[in-house]
Image: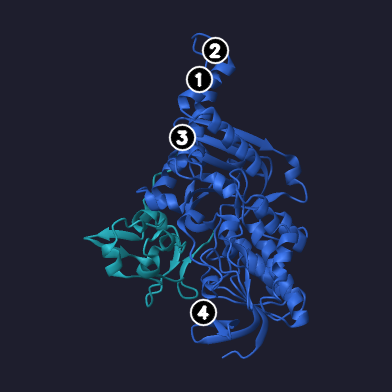
Chain colours: A cyan, B blue
Amino acid sequence: MALKRLSIEQLLGLNKFVVDDEEAHILLDKECCRSCITRPCTAACPAGCYKAEKGEVNFDYAGCLECGTCRVVCPLSDRAIVWRYPRGGFGIQFRYG
Amino acid sequence: MANDKFTAIVVGAGPAGSTAALVLARAGHEVLLIEKGAVPGAKNMFGGRLYSHALNRIIPEFWERAPVERPVVRETLTLLHDGRSVSLNVRNLDWVSPPHHSFTLHRAEFDAWLASEAEEAGAMLACSIRVDDLLMENGRVIGIRAGEDEMFADVVIAADGVNSLLAQRAGLAGMASPRQVATGVKQIIELPSDVIRRRFQLEGNNGAAQLFVGDCTGGMQGGGFVYTNRESVSLGLVINANELRKTQRSLFELIEDFKMNPHIAPLLEGGDVGEYSAHLIPEAGLAMMPRVFGQGILVAGDAAGFALNLGYVVRGMDFAIASGEAAAKTVIQAKKHNDFSRRGLSFYQKYLRENFVLRDLAAYRRAPEFMENCRLFETYPDLITSLMAEVFTVSGSQPVHLFTKILSRVRQSRVSLAKLFIDGWRGATWL
């Protein structure tokens, strides 16, 4: 049977995450993001965590694969994104890797 | 809190960090290996293959004990364009007899094993700890801070991966530019081992590695890969971040397209996706290398940008392991003179040259520039696949000799002979 096409939600659903409910490891400066025209994070994030909605950029840290692509492609990187890894033991847990 | 002072604190239990900790522990030094994941390997992923040489020198015949998947017997390089593909297939039985040339593996298992080797040698392993900052004194690194805890050491080895926040905190590295890194995504496709054996024409537990260039990346700088594990196939795409910055196409859609590609789909049929992962890859070699040593600090592995993509060979783990070893040897040397200043740690560069890391990166220093040539990802795959398709087509039309076919295809591709020659020459002398 041919493989089925999976959505990003389905793909992320296969992964094991330990979500840190108390602390988001990536914070956005909403002002910066509002002024950003290109918003490369929305297409470049391999987990589709960045979404442009109503003129704002929203980030859902729960499905983050912790690759760092957003930080690299962001034109306002040092101001718009405060990027850290999740607290110890939280975040993505690769079973294969 | 902890007042014990270690000889070295190694941040990151990936291949660079665990190797550094292992070599230091074997030499009898107090070493603390800190990992942010709940277990070593939980945060790590790669394409799929380890070249054995570096680890085999440190743990001889490591494959007898390590959780490796398959030794690779067959290498394939495939050009893709539309409905056509052209492959170069190389099979070498020498690669699968000791010392095995390369292995596919899963990082979650392998990294956990390598860290346990360091632990058995006497290193102290602390997991679920995110290092937040370096402790500095008079411009010298003297330890690390993790939350409320402070820990001290003669030297800190930053093996904290491609996004090395520590190398940046120490002022040794800046932010990578998009051109200097690529994003890799991977799906694990679970399949029974006998199905893998049949589809990839493998004997016993031998494995296959296949790299793809062409429209799997939508013409963007990068490529695709397939590696066979025991009971799964690693399928992935790697695309330069500067291309991702400009495109509207998502990697998770491109990898789905790749999976559905008629050249790939038959290999994966009936499989289940087991995991989807992503990681950044340093691609600029020496051009992005930070200062790899400072006052009380050494940088190893991906954090130092030690990786190499030649298009047909992709290396990272062997550099990580060898740089971890070089960092450990540097610390052992520095401890003898109790000099952990920049000068005392400058041996690092010497060890990195001797053990191949800097030698190889220097020899292939122009490879990253070669890879930025957009013709490699669209024009040439199109040219070569259409030419070869024509060569093998029998249609009853007027016979045309090979030389004429080649010339007319080159003319159609609109690449001048001069450009073709230059690209060919660069490929042959830079890669």
Residue for point 49% across, 12% down: B395
**CA separation, marks 3 and 2?**
30 Å
Q: Pointers 1 and 3 in contact (CB under 8 A)?
A: no
Residue for point 73% across, 45% down: B95
Q: Pointers 2 and 1 in contact (CB under 8 A)?
A: yes
Q: List the residue tagged with mark 1.
A: B408
Vertical placement of B162 versus B188: above or below? below
Mark nearest the camera among 4 and 1 is 1
Q: List the residue tagged with mark 4.
A: B133
Identify the image quadrant of residue B46.
Answer: bottom right
Within 10 Å of disc 2 (Cα), the crowding (few <14, some 14-19, many 20+) is few
Q: Pointers 4 and 1 in contact (CB under 8 A)?
A: no
Question: In the picture, which quadrant includes the N terminus of chain B?
Answer: bottom right
Mark nearest the camera among 1 and 3 is 1
- Hey, what amino acid is under mark 1? Ser
State whether discs 4 and 2 lie on one chain: yes
State whether discs 2 and 1 lie on one chain: yes
Is tag 4's residue or tag 1's residue first in the polypeptide sequence? 4
Identify the image quadrant of residue B219.
Answer: top left
Query: Chain for mark 2?
Result: B
Query: Which mark, by number, is residue B400?
Result: 2
**CA separation, marks 4 and 1?**
61 Å
Instruction: Estimate the x, y position of residue B391 in percent, counting from the top left.
Output: 55, 20
State whether discs 4 and 1 lie on one chain: yes
- Hey, what amino acid is under mark 3? Pro
**Residue A80 seen in the figure:** yes
Q: Pointers 3 and 2 in contact (CB under 8 A)?
A: no
Query: Chain for mark 1?
Result: B
Q: What element carries label 1?
A: helix
